[in-house]
């Protein structure tokens, strides 16, 4: 019985599931940026170095957020291709010859 379940393809992703995954990517970008900026603001207030750590926190948040979005995008694309619906197989992606 386990052998039968292991040979099945994963269910095809739904539009709602993809929208949820992509909206989660927005949080993946926004949260590190906000956290880095607020952390920099706190450090600048504590060390009296405005705006050094705000800018450093913002830059670090942008880097972390971009890397997280990249990883999320790769996992979404992997899920999409494992379902057997890659861009070349997607019926909605037709190219005119």
Image: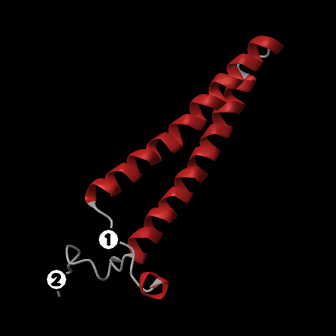
> Which mark is on residue 96?
2
- Residue at 35% in and 80% down: 84
Q: For the view shown, which residue lies furthest in the front direction?
A: 1
Rendered location of residue 16, percent (x, y): 28, 54
Choose between 73 and 1: the one closer to the eye: 1
Count every numbered label the image shows and give the total.
Answer: 2
Q: Is residue 55 left or right of residue 13?
A: right
Task: Note whether 20 is above or below 3 in the view shown.
Answer: above
Which residue appears at 32% of the width and 52% of the height? 19
Q: Quadrant of the C terminus?
A: bottom left
Q: Going 48% across and 40% down the picture, which residue do you hit?
A: 27
Question: Furthest residue to the right?
Answer: 47
Report whether 55 appears left or right of 46: left
Q: Residue furthest left?
A: 96
Element class at badge 1 = loop
| Residue drawn 54% across the image and 57% down it | 70
Question: What is the quadrant of residue 71 in the picture?
Answer: bottom right
Which quarter of the picture shows residue 53? top right
Question: x, y percentage for residue 83?
Answer: 37, 76
């Amino acid at each position: 019985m386990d052998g039968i379940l292991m040979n099945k393809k994963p269910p095809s992703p739904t539009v709602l599931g993809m929208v949820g995954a992509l909206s989660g990517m927005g949080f993946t970008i926004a949260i590190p940026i906000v956290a880095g900026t607020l952390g920099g603001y706190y450090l600048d207030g504590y060390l009296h170095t405005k705006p050094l750590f705000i800018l450093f926190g913002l830059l670090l948040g942008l880097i972390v957020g971009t890397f997280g979005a990249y990883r999320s995008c790769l996992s979404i694309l992997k899920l999409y291709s494992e379902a057997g619906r890659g861009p070349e197989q997607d019926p909605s992606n037709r190219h005119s010859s």
